[in-house]
Image (tube, rainbow, N blue to C red):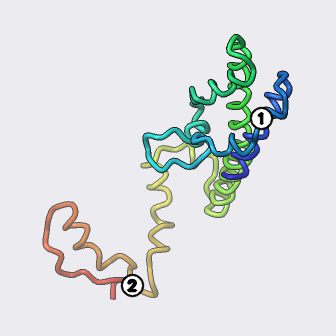
C-alpha cells in the first residue's frame, strides 16, 4: 500500500511538471502528509482507500488547481482522471491479478472445472456429495457424527446432549 501511495504521488508530481508547474514549487513531503495519502483513523475521514474506490477528493483537486492555476479547471479534471486511472491500473496489476491467479490455482487443485462453476449450487452439491462424504471420516468413524445434536440445537432449539468431537 505504501508503494502504491508513493507511486501515485510521484505520478501526480510528474503530471504537474508536464503541465508547466515549476518543480521547485512542488514539495513531495508536503503531498505525502496530506490526509488523502494516509490511512484513515476514522471512517468519516477521506483516505487513499477511497481513491482506490474511484472517489477523487475535492481537497486534492483544489491543490491541483492551486499549482496549475484556478482558471484551468478542465486540465485539473484531466489530471484527476489520469491519477484515478493510474491507481486503478496499479491495483489491478499488483493486487487483483495475483488474487485471481491464486484462485485459479486453488480451483485447479480442488478439481473444479468451468462446467462446475456454471452449475447451480444444488446440482454441484448433489454430484459432489459422495466425494465429500468419503472425506468426512476419521478412521472408521464419521467425522461429524457427534455434532448432530448441535445441528438440531441450531435448527430446532433442542438440548445439546451428545456433543462429541470427531465421533469418538
Task: Tell me what residue is drawn at x 45 percent, y 84 percent.
Answer: 138
Q: In which quarter of the image is residue 65?
A: top right
> Total marks drawn?
2
- Residue 58: x and y, percent? 57, 26
Residue toward you, 137 or 54? 54
Residue 87 visible in image: yes
Comes first in the chain, label 1 or label 2? 1
User: Badge 1 local density, few (<14 within 10 Å), some, or many (20+)?
Assistant: some
Tell me the residue that label 1 is attached to.
26
Residue 107: mark: none
Task: Tell me what residue is drawn at x 59 percent, y 39 percent.
Answer: 36
Residue 91 visible in image: no
User: Badge 2 local density, few (<14 within 10 Å), some, or many (20+)?
Assistant: few
Tell me the residue that label 2 is attached to.
141
Rendered view: 72 above or below 146: above
Q: CA separation, marks 1 and 2?
A: 70 Å
- Residue 150: x and y, percent? 24, 71
For numbered disc 2, what is the local secondary structure? strand
In the picture, the quarter occupied by the C terminus is: bottom left
Rendered view: 71 above or below 115: above
- Residue 87: x and y, percent? 70, 37
Residue toward you, 113 or 149? 149
Q: Are marks 1 and 2 in contact (CB under 8 Å)?
A: no
Residue toward you, 109 or 33? 33
For numbered disc 1, what is the local secondary structure? loop
Residue 102 lies left or right of residue 13; in this view the side is: left
Task: Tell me what residue is drawn at x 66 percent, y 28 percent.
Answer: 63
Amino acid at each position: 500500500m505504501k508503494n502504491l501511495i508513493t507511486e501515485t504521488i510521484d505520478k501526480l508530481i510528474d503530471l504537474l511538471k508536464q503541465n508547466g508547474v515549476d518543480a521547485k514549487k512542488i514539495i513531495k513531503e508536503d503531498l505525502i502528509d496530506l490526509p488523502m495519502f494516509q490511512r484513515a483513523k476514522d471512517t468519516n475521514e477521506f483516505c487513499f482507500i477511497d481513491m482506490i474506490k474511484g472517489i477523487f477528493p475535492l481537497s486534492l483537486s483544489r491543490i491541483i488547481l492551486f499549482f496549475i492555476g484556478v482558471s484551468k479547471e478542465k486540465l485539473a479534471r484531466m489530471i484527476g482522471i489520469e491519477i484515478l486511472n493510474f491507481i486503478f491500473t496499479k491495483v489491478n496489476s499488483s493486487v487483483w491479478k495475483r488474487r485471481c491467479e491464486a484462485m485459479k490455482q486453488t480451483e485447479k487443485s480442488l478439481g473444479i472445472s468451468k462446467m462446475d462453476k456454471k452449475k447451480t449450487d444444488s446440482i454441484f452439491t448433489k454430484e459432489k456429495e459422495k466425494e465429500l462424504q468419503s472425506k468426512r471420516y476419521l478412521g472408521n468413524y464419521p467425522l461429524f457424527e457427534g455434532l448432530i445434536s448441535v445441528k438440531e440445537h441450531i435448527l430446532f432449539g433442542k438440548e445439546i446432549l451428545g456433543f462429541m468431537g470427531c465421533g469418538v
